[in-house]
Image: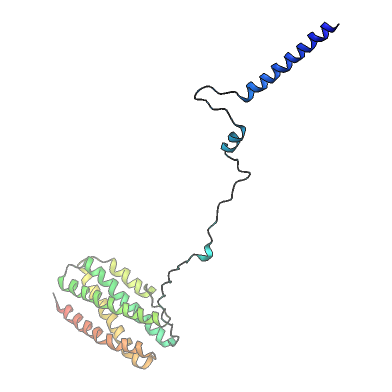
Amino acid sequence: MKMQLLLLGALVLCGCRKESEAAEDWTTYKAPSGEQPADPRAVEAAAPRAESEEQPPQETDLRNELVIVPDAPTPTPEPTPDPTLTPDDLQFVQQAAYDGLYAVLSSQLALEKSTSEPHRSFAQKLIDEHSASNKELADLVRIKGGEAPTTLDASRQRKLDELDALEPPAFDGAYRDAQIQAHEDSIRQFEDAASVVDDPELLTFAQRVLPKLREHRRELDELHETP
């Protein structure tokens, strides 16, 4: 019995020595050459820390930004309409515009249809001078808040259509007679403007154009004598 107890004690003592050696082997373990042991604390420190949440993008504070707004161009003031044109003034404007427009349109037909050089030369003069006076009248009336006619009335349109239907040589005589009648009517109207028209600028226009109308009428007499 005593011998058995001694054997049991020896076995226990041997087991304890082996566990002690195993623990010592673990703490004194050396990694193979070129390889370092993994330290859990070093691994944790080297690992990138995950962001718990994304940071919102920074917004630019525009309160401190200097914003330069270019100056708007200054609009050109429109002419102030002058409501001083009387019914007689407007009547004169209407008839003068019709006569001037008829002189231009009928003379354009003469350039297309006439075979007479004197008639064509006279027609071009009427186109140039009546176009200029027509524009002057239209601009003057527009500043005063009105509008001059830009198309013929029914009576003058009918006369223009009759001329357009003619062919040379009948056209030249009809064109000359039509201009004689139209200019005589215009001369009377512009002469009456002194006692009818109230607007001073409109009256000045009539007085400036009247000599040209008389000149055209004299040239028509000369044109009548041309073979």
| Residue 48: % across, % down | 57, 39
- Whether residue 36 sits left or right of residue 206 in the image: it is right
Front residue of this view, candidates 82 and 222: 82
- In this picture, is 51 found above or below 159? above
Residue under the point 32% across and 80% down: 136
| Residue 185: % across, % down | 31, 83
Residue under the point 58% across and 50% down: 56
User: Looking at the image, which residue sits at the far left?
Assistant: 227
Q: Quadrant of the N terminus?
A: top right
Residue under the point 19% across and 75% down: 122
Q: Quadrant of the C terminus?
A: bottom left
- In this picture, is 162 found above or below 98? above
- Whether residue 214 sits left or right of residue 91 in the image: it is left
Front residue of this view, candidates 111 and 4: 4
Q: Quadrant of residue 19?
A: top right
Q: Quadrant of residue 7?
A: top right
- Whether residue 151 sits left or right of residue 44 in the image: it is left
| Residue 178: % across, % down | 27, 76
User: Looking at the image, which residue sits at the far front?
Assistant: 2
